[in-house]
Amino acid sequence: MIALPPALLPELADGLWHLSAVFLRVSALVSLLPAFGERSIPTRVKLGVAAAFTLIVTPAVPQPNQAHEFVPLVTMVFTEILVGVALGIGLRLFVLALQTAGSIAAQSTSLSQILGGAAVDPVPAMGYLLTLAGLVLAVLLGLHIRVAQFLIHSYTLFPMGIAPLAPDLSQWSVQQIARSFNLAFSLAMPFVIASLIYNLALGVINRAMPQLMVAFVGAPAITFAGLFLLFAGTPLILSVWSDALIAFMTNPLEVIR
């Protein structure tokens, strides 16, 4: 058995602690990461992804100068998990924006009950298709590379062991939730406008011809219009969504105007 030099042991201990500290933030973020952190992904795969990101990010993160005592270590552990969860929730809100946009579009075009239980979460078919297409597009655009850059950049915004202030964190969270709903409604706007035009036209026809069963005539029309808008508008919807996701990963502290 080869004995390690005594001077090497402190270096190994510091390196192992540095790796563990980075793993705390990375694993918390990966558990909520789009595509890699979905509920359908096995836990072992998520653990492997977190370990891979940790090995990539650790060399680019400076080692903290902190005493190895119990209270500072516990503080750092909770701080790193908090920052990782906060950043992961910020990314997860973009997936929820696609699901919400799909739900709004499906409710507007009377397509909310088709394939409602196909996904892990009970979302309408439009929400499931938009979410799946958005995750595939994000992976094709190099999500893993951008996540690694995002994690490295996060240590500039939130240095290791320094917890964000509660007022700043709460304000940032409210801004991200507002951005998510704003983005969801913006993506579903064509379907809402089509539904408004449909209901106005249906009301006018009903007033002009009370004997006509306008609901039976209009139901196929709004269904076809919804499917056509989904077919024609999905590329633009995914383009706007991916641009917003990339903008957030470039600057997660951007103030919403």
Image (cartoon, grey):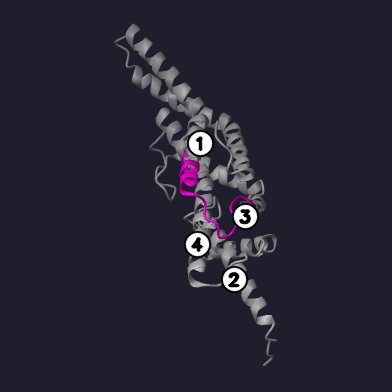
Task: State how far apart marks 1 and 2 are (Cα).
Answer: 36 Å
Q: Earlier in the sequence, mark 1 or mark 2?
A: 2
Say which amino acid is labelled 3: Tyr
Task: Name the residue located 65 percent from the left edge and 50 percent from the top edge.
Answer: 146
Q: Nearer the viewer, mark 3 or mark 4?
A: 3
Residue occupying image coordinates x 60% and y 65% = 51
The CA span between labels 1 and 3 is: 23 Å
Q: Nearer the viewer, residue 256 or 206?
A: 256
Marks 1 and 2 close (CB-CB < 8 Å)? no
Q: Is residue 91 visible?
A: yes
Given this view, does label 1 or label 3 mark the residue nearer the observer? 3
In the image, residue 54 sits, relative to residue 256, either above or below, namely below
| Left or right of residue 170, residue 5 in this image | right
- Label 1: few (<14), some or many (≥20) within 10 Å? some
**Which percent across, then down, holds residue 19?**
61, 68
* N-terminal-most mark, 4 or 1: 4
Is 132 on the left-hand or right-hand side of 198?
A: right
Mark 3 or mark 4, earlier in chain: 4
Residue 77 position in % (x across, y down): 51, 64
Marked residue nearer the N-terminal end (1 or 3): 3
Q: Between 120 and 221, which is closer to the camera in this rendering?
A: 120
Which quadrant, please, contains the N terminus?
bottom right
Identify the residue position indicated by label 2 in the image: 17
Q: Which residue is mark 1?
A: 179
Eyeballing the image, is 201 above or below 221? above
Q: What kind of residue is marked 4?
A: Pro
Give the number of the disc on residue 155. Answer: 3
Q: Residue at x 52, y 68 (%)?
A: 73
Mark 2 crowdedness (10 Å alpha carbons): few <14, some 14-19, many ≥20: some
What is the secondary structure assignment of the residue under circle 4?
Answer: loop
Q: What secondary structure is found at the residue carrying circle 1?
A: helix
